[in-house]
Image (tube, rainbow, N blue to C red):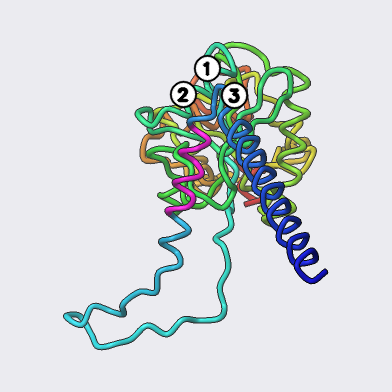
Amino acid sequence: MKKTIISFAVTFHVNTIMKYSLFLIMLIVLLGNSCSTGKYADSNKIYKQQAKNFAAELKKQPAGIDSAMMAGQWVGTTNFGMRKPNFVIIHHTAQTACDTTLRTFTLPRTQVSAHYVICKDGTINHMLNDNLRAWHAGNSKWGNVTDVNSVSIGIELDNNGFEPFSEAQIKSLLDVLKKLKKDNNIPTANFIGHADIAPKRKVDPNKYFPWQQLAANGFGYWYDTANVKLPENFDAMQGLRIIGYDTRDAVAAIRAFKLHFVQNDSTTVLTDADRKIIYDLYRKY
């Protein structure tokens, strides 16, 4: 009787192991297939590996301060958190299709990326963790910020640069902005365009972008000059600088300002109406 029980137990144990092994094999196959399907499977694998490498780097305990500079030791603080973005920069892709942009951002040789790409039909493609640094701003400046990539979220809108933005696209953008503002406590003033931070190089998002609509929803400021009386000694260029524009190239700064706030005027001459707008805006910053 004892032998029979032992034999049954062994048989049951072996069968259980075989079934469990088969389950694991099936699970691995399913996971492998789920990871390998889709046209962006390779870039997803690269993303995971790079994120893993960054995580491994963060786990390392520094060896301490370079003794050649000063004596010291590593004492790990208990008070820290993930870095949070403080700006949102809006772009247009200047390409002909959303899929083309996704492809561009998944090729290592392009050295360009964004956190979000929003297609014309409103599809939101999240391409990078919001706490990681994308390569979208390039050589840019806003106020005293000279490394915009390190403090911002980049959002690309599928648009060739010469056409209006679709209603579905703007709706999705507003949804994304609402979440980003809430999650990161981003100031209202800090929702701006690529042309704002790189006026000599960029013209995105284009003149059809609805900045006033965004401002009405709490993303960026807009102006109201109905009761504005312009001071006689008001310096408009200084006003632009206080708003955030890089005014070292006055023509480029004026062009970027008008692309954002006076979209029906492509000239680089400031009228009294323009000065009133600048004056009203600078008082908000």
- Asked whether disc 2 touches disc 1, contact meaning CB atoms under 8 Å apart, the reply is yes
Residue 27 in view (yes/no): yes
Q: How far apart in space, not on screen, are marks 3 and 2 (Cα)? A: 16 Å
Q: Position of residue 146 (x, y in %)?
A: 41, 49
Q: Secondary structure at mark 3?
A: loop
Chief secondary structure of the magenta span? helix
Magenta part of the chain: 43-53
Q: Position of residue 183 (x, y in %)?
A: 71, 54
Amino acid residing under circle 3: Gly
Q: Position of residue 138 (x, y in %)?
A: 40, 37
**Residue 3, above or below 246:** below
Q: Look at mark 1 in the image and give the residue it sits on.
A: 100
Q: Position of residue 171 (x, y in %)?
A: 78, 28
Q: Look at mark 2 in the image and give the residue it sits on.
A: 104
Amino acid residing under circle 2: Thr
Q: Front-most of 243 and 156? A: 156
Magenta region includes residue 102: no
Magenta region includes residue 44: yes
Q: Residue at x 59, y 24 (%)?
A: 38
Q: Label 2 crowding class (10 Å Cα cut-off): few <14, some 14-19, many 20+?
A: some
N-term mark: 3 or 1: 3
Q: Look at mark 3 in the image and give the residue it sits on.
A: 38
> Which of labels 3 and 1 is toward the front?
3
N-term mark: 3 or 2: 3
Q: Residue at x 66, y 53 (%)?
A: 186
Q: Secondary structure at mark 1?
A: helix
Amino acid residing under circle 1: Thr
